Amino acid sequence: MLRTFLLACVLISGFDMAARAQDAPQGDATAGKQLYLSTGCFYCHGRVGQGGAYNREAPSLAKTIVPYLGFKQQLRNPSGDMPAYADAVMSEKDLADIFAFLQALPGRRDVKDFTILND
């Protein structure tokens, strides 16, 4: 019974991830990197989206699991110290490009990948 439940959860989460990938408009990761750096996103979120702490902790954005619509909502109506980016400041294409850049990043590495931690 538990195995069936776990298998169902894995299958459902796989479909959910596919749905999240499909809801994002096509973006240009190269243009997104330029925008990410020129608009100052890196001040809080790091040059490769690793997260950081400027005024307070900023989340990692590399290979984010947040769906595109949630990403867009956070940029348009942010929580915390993050500034809002209205459509006049950052277009829908700009958002798609930044999202594509963040998805192209490698994301967090597994602890096993750090040889110094495995001695």
Image: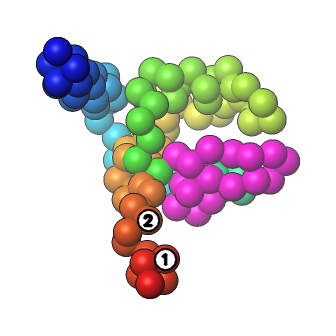
Query: Would residue 32 be seen by someone viewing this image from the given angle?
Result: no
Residue 14, by quadrant, is top left
Looking at the picture, how far across and down is residue 11, in whole percent? 17, 24
Looking at the picture, how far across and down is residue 56, in whole percent? 81, 45
Image quadrant occupied by the N terminus: top left
- Secondary structure type for disc 1: helix
Residue type, label 1: Leu
Residue type, label 2: Val
Q: Which residue is mark 1?
A: 117
Residue 18, by quadrant, is top left
Q: Is residue 44 left or right of residue 72?
A: right
Q: Which residue is mark 2?
A: 111
Q: Is residue 11 left or right of residue 72?
A: left
> In the image, which residues are magenta?
46-61
- Secondary structure type for disc 2: helix
Q: Are marks 1 and 2 in contact (CB under 8 Å)?
A: yes
Q: Is residue 16 above or below residue 60?
A: above
